[in-house]
């Protein structure tokens, strides 16, 4: 699925999917010549993972090498060709160790290819996007960095409910609790004919609350050459700067920007990653840009305070031609001195002139 994400100051890392780690490919062990085969009774056996990563939605096969004793029992199993996922490889290795083998002579080596079925249940990404973990301002200024892993599965006797627990702690109970609170509102989608006992679905949330004061002050999004820029104060969510200070951090789909200004009194908010993922999910595979909004909130002692500059970049379809273009709406709420407010609006006017 291909999507265009255009943003200033927003970086999506391609090395993970929603913070979900993919195991790096390790050097494969040297394979020996197999002298044992899988017993016929286990020919249709498959691995049964206790936990699936939430980004795994397909079946896999894992080639395992096991040492077999004279009674056909396996021990010392290791992965030869893995799935690039630690949880699936571990499940395949454990399955191969539990099977019986037939050998020529007194034991030997077997190399079964272990099927790993696709998970029956999957995390509903829209429910995740609508219920992101909310971290307190104290946590966001704590300087902590790391990740936490939460496990989910359908609740026994209530398929519509979700059982959640921490699979791997962040080391801080406040962060663990924030993720558990969010995960209780996530949904799993499962076929009706799935077994009563479900494996866990693992979701990993990364966080980085380390200060970035050495970075330059963020600026409003500069429009691309083919953008249309307009003034549109009607898009402001609140009528006062105090309203933005109090309510904007609580709004769904809004998050603190990872790169904050070193200037006192300046806070930058962005469209949250969850809101971006929700919009991508609703496009159903269409190639189109997503809507991104930035809020620059200025309070004393900043010289322009109190003021808010809101920029929103979105795709617009021309009613006459049917062609699309990108439009940047710039909204200003200024309660500062008239001269400071006039300077803010002059900067907006200059961006509008440049886009024509």
Image: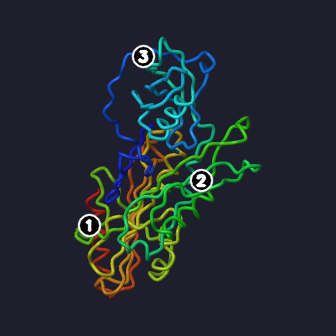
Q: Label 1 neighbourhood size at 10 Å, few (<14), some (14-19), many (20+)?
A: few
- Does 300 sit left or right of 246 as displayed? left
Q: Residue at x 59, y 57 (%)?
A: 165
Under circle 2, the secondary element is helix
Under circle 1, the secondary element is helix
The image shows residue 127 at horizontal and vertical percentages of 59, 53
Under circle 3, the secondary element is loop
First along the sequence among labels 2 and 1:
2
Q: Label 3 neighbourhood size at 10 Å, few (<14), some (14-19), many (20+)?
A: some
Relative to 237, is 223 above or below? above
Mark whose residue sits in front, 3 or 2: 3
Which residue is the extreme one toward the top? 104
Q: Are marks 1 and 3 in contact (CB under 8 Å)?
A: no
First along the sequence among labels 1 and 3:
3
Q: Residue at x 35, y 79 (%)?
A: 298
Q: Give the residue number, with chain letter if any, for mark 3.
A: 34
The image shows residue 43 at horizontal and vertical percentages of 59, 18
Q: Give the residue number, with chain letter if any, for mark 2.
A: 127
- Does 184 sit left or right of 4 as displayed? right
In depth, the one of 241 and 343 nearer the eye is 241
Measure how far apart labels 1 and 3 are at the Cα level: 74 Å
In depth, the one of 155 and 10 nearer the eye is 155
Q: Give the residue number, with chain letter if any, for mark 1.
A: 350
First along the sequence among labels 3 and 2:
3
């Amino acid at each position: 699925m291909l999507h265009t994400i255009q943003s200033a100051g927003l970086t999506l890392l391609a090395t993970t999917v929603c913070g979900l780690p993919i195991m790096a490919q390790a050097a494969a062990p040297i394979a020996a010549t197999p002298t044992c085969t899988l017993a016929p009774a286990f020919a249709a056996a498959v691995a049964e993972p206790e936990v699936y990563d939430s980004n795994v939605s397909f079946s896999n096969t894992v080639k395992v090498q096991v040492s077999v004793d004279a009674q056909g029992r396996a021990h010392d199993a290791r992965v030869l060709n893995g799935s690039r996922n630690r949880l699936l490889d571990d499940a395949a290795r454990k399955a191969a160790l539990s099977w019986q083998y037939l050998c020529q002579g007194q034991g030997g080596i077997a190399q079964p290819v272990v099927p790993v079925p696709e998970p029956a249940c999957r995390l509903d990404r829209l429910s995740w996007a609508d219920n992101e973990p909310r971290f307190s301002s104290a946590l966001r200024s704590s300087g902590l960095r790391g990740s936490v892993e939460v496990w989910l599965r359908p609740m026994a006797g209530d398929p519509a409910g979700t059982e959640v627990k921490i699979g791997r702690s962040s080391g801080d109970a406040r962060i663990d609790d924030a993720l558990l609170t969010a995960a209780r509102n996530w949904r799993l989608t499962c076929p009706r004919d799935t077994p009563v006992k479900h494996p866990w679905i693992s979701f990993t949330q990364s966080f980085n609350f380390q200060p970035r004061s050495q970075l330059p002050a963020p600026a409003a999004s500069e429009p691309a050459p083919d953008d249309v820029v307009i003034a549109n104060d009607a898009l402001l969510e609140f009528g006062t700067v105090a309203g933005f200070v109090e309510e904007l951090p609580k709004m769904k789909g809004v998050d603190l920007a990872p790169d904050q200004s070193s200037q006192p009194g300046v806070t930058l908010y962005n469209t949250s990653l969850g809101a971006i993922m929700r919009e991508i999910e609703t496009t159903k595979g269409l190639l189109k840009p997503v809507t991104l909004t930035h809020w620059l909130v200025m309070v004393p002692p900043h010289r322009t305070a109190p003021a808010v500059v809101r920029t929103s970049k979105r795709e617009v379809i021309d009613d006459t031609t049917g062609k699309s273009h990108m439009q940047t709406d710039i909204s200003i709420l200024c309660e500062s001195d008239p001269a400071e407010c006039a300077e803010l609006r002059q900067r907006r006017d200059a961006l509008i002139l440049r886009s024509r």
